[in-house]
Image (tube, helix red, strand yellow):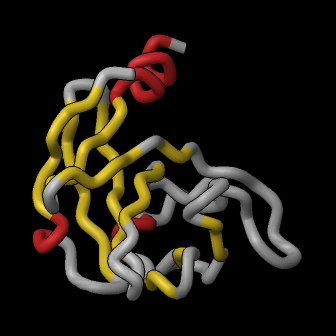
Amino acid sequence: MSWIDVGHIDDIPLRGARLVKTPAGCVALFRTSEAEVFAASDTCPHKGGPLSEGIVHGRSVTCPLHNWVFSLETGAAQGADEGQIPTYEVKLEEGRILLDTAALSARAAA
C-alpha cells in the first residue's frame, strides 16, 4: 500500500464530505456521525451525480441528483437500485487522513 496524507479529519464536517484531488484522480472523502472516514468515487454511476454533495447518513451516502444510496463500506447500491462505486482504503493516524493510492493508481491505469 502507498499512503498519502489528504488532510485532517476536522477538515470534513460530521455527516459531510470533501473532494480531494490526488495524483491518481479525484476522490470523495466522507465523514460519518461516528467520526469514521470513508473514501469513494465522487461519481454516481446512474447519472454522474457528485456524491461529495450528497447526504451522508449512517455508513451510506445518497446521491443529490436522484437519491440513489450507496454503502460507504462496499460501494454497493442499496435498495432496489443496482450499481457500484469504487471505494478506497483510508486510515486515520493522529487525526490525519491517509489514503491508499495503490487502488487509485490501478484504476487510473485500467
What residue is rendered at 44% in x and 66% in y? 51
Q: Quadrant of residue 89?
A: top left
**Furthest-right residue in view?**
80
Quadrant for the C terminus, please: top right
Position of residue 78 relative to residue 89, above or below, is below
Residue at 20 percent across and 73 percent down: it is 12
Q: Which quarter of the image is occupied by the N terminus?
A: top left
Please tell me whether residue 95 is drawn above or below residue 24 in the rendered image: below
User: Looking at the rendering, which quadrant does residue 104 occupy?
Assistant: top left
Which x, y percent locates residue 67?
61, 82
Q: Residue at x 31, y 80 (%)?
A: 16
Q: Image check: 73 left or right of 108? A: right
x, y percent for residue 88: 47, 42
Q: Is residue 43 shown above or below 57?
A: above
Of all residues, the one furthest to the front in this rendering is 94
- On the picture, is 50 further left or further right than 80? left
The picture places residue 21, in percent across and down from the top left corner, at: 20, 42
Furthest toward the top, the residue is: 109
Nearer to me, 24 or 50: 24
Q: Which residue is rendered at x = 12% and y = 54% of the image? A: 7
* Residue 90: image location, x then y, percent: 38, 47
